[in-house]
Image: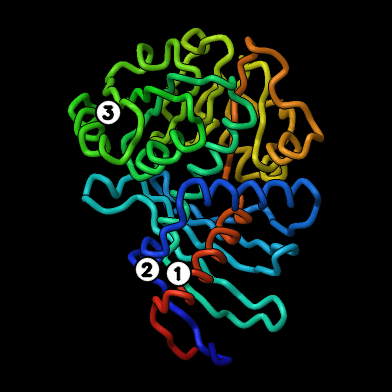
């Protein structure tokens, strides 16, 4: 592209380049390993907070090993679902690290969903029992869709995913609509306790900002839990688990994150990158209960977005514009 040109990639363009779940997991794995090596510059996200549980975050990252730089500007407005609007809106901007010039702007909500599910899958690969067969997903939104399609790719022994909805009809509709896209059996649930009991992996992906979704007594020995909505609301489960692993420790030192944990910040045993590179131990024994608190790393967004850009150029997708 000529100097001064910016490529615009719409959601359909991002979708068309078809980064598969396994490819996305590999990209996220690289990002986490580079983070563990200290090769990345990823400041803690900063945000603004319109009322009613809304927020818009700025998430920058410089990926030294691949020479990529960018920023995600992402909005999470949970109440949007009541009016039929997406709850997540996002843009990703890529810049030339040599000149600082922006060269691509792309829709970021789809990448957010894909890389989040990939990060969960990677966490389970590193921490869950090696022969997981039953999992539970609490939520039926966009993130639930990406997790239902990604987790079976990462966990080949997985046979059943229980899906919990706000209403049973929502869970039934979700399972019916996603049955063709998922290689495992999807079973609708309304009762969270019944859905969680006996599950070896559990993921919460809801818009519940303050409602506690899990109780320690429900969590089976040897299970691995990923909290992807507001982790601070899980005031009992977090402090009852044997090990707590995160994608990045640094955000937990910020005032914004600390405000979420009304029962106090959890003890953090390590980062997933440290587990992947062998710096720290992941699972110690088959009965250990592990919780994963991935707050979301801009490194994952920029690494995946850079791959999307490369494929879009090869496929001649997008619209070019002058700044």
* Depth check, front residue: 317 or 236: 317
Judging by the rendered image, the residue that carries numbered circle 1 is 106
Q: Where 304 falls versus 80 (above or below)?
A: below
Relative horizontal placement of residue 168, taking residue 111 as reference (left or right):
left
Q: Residue furthest front?
A: 156
Q: Is disc 2 in contact with disc 1, using a CB cutoff of under 8 Å?
A: yes
Q: Secondary structure at mark 1?
A: strand
Which of label 2 and label 3 is nearer to you? 2
Q: Secondary structure at mark 3?
A: loop
Judging by the rendered image, the residue that carries numbered circle 2 is 13
Which of label 1 and label 3 is nearer to you? 1
Q: Is disc 1 in contact with disc 3, using a CB cutoff of under 8 Å?
A: no
Residue at (80, 52) in percent of width and height: 38
Residue at (51, 49) in percent of width and height: 115
Q: Which sits earlier in the primary sequence, circle 2 or circle 3?
A: 2
Relative horizontal placement of residue 59, taking residue 218 as reference (left or right):
right
Question: Residue 68, position in %: x, y?
Answer: 66, 68
Question: Residue 122, position in %: x, y?
Answer: 58, 38
Q: CA distance from mark 2 to mark 1?
A: 9 Å
Give neighbour class at mark 2: few <14, some 14-19, many 20+ (Cα, 10 Å): many
**In the figure, residue 82 lies in which quadrant?**
top left
Q: Where 181 falls versus 217 (above or below)?
A: below
* Depth check, front residue: 50 or 174: 174
Q: CA distance from mark 2 to mark 3?
A: 32 Å
Q: Secondary structure at mark 2?
A: helix
Question: Residue 261, position in %: x, y?
Answer: 59, 31
Q: Which sits earlier in the primary sequence, circle 1 or circle 3?
A: 1
Judging by the rendered image, the residue that carries numbered circle 3 is 166
Q: Which sits earlier in the primary sequence, circle 2 or circle 1?
A: 2
């Amino acid at each position: 592209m000529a100097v001064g040109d910016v490529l615009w990639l719409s959601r359909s363009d991002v979708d068309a380049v078809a980064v598969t779940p396994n490819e996305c997991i590999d990209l996220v794995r690289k990002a986490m390993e580079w983070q563990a090596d200290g090769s990345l510059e990823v400041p803690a996200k900063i945000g603004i907070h319109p009322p009613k549980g809304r927020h818009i975050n700025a998430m920058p990252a410089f990926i030294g090993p691949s020479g990529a730089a960018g920023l995600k500007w992402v909005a999470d407005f949970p109440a949007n679902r009541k009016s039929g609007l997406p709850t997540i809106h996002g843009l990703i901007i890529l810049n030339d690290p040599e000149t600082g010039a922006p060269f691509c702007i792309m829709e970021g909500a789809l990448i957010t969903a894909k890389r989040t599910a990939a990060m969960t899958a990677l966490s389970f690969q590193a921490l869950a029992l090696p022969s997981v067969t039953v999992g539970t997903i609490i939520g039926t939104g966009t993130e639930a869709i990406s997790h239902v399609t990604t987790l079976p790719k990462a966990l080949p022994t997985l046979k059943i995913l229980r899906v919990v909805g706000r209403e049973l009809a929502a869970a039934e509709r979700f399972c019916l609509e996603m049955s063709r896209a998922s290689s495992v059996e999807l079973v609708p649930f309304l009762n969270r306790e019944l859905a969680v009991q006996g599950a070896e992996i559990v993921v919460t992906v809801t818009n519940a900002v303050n409602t506690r979704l899990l109780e320690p007594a429900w969590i089976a020995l040897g299970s691995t839990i990923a909290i992807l909505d507001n982790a601070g609301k899980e005031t009992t489960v977090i402090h009852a688990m044997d090990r707590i692993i995160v994608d990045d420790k640094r955000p937990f030192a910020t005032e914004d994150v600390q405000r979420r944990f009304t029962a106090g910040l959890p003890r953090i045993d390590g980062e997933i990158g440290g587990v992947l590179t062998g710096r720290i131990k992941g699972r110690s024994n088959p009965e250990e209960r592990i919780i994963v608190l991935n707050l979301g790393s801009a490194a994952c967004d920029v690494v995946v977005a850079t791959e999307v850009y490369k494929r879009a150029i090869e496929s001649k997708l997008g619209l070019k514009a002058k700044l």
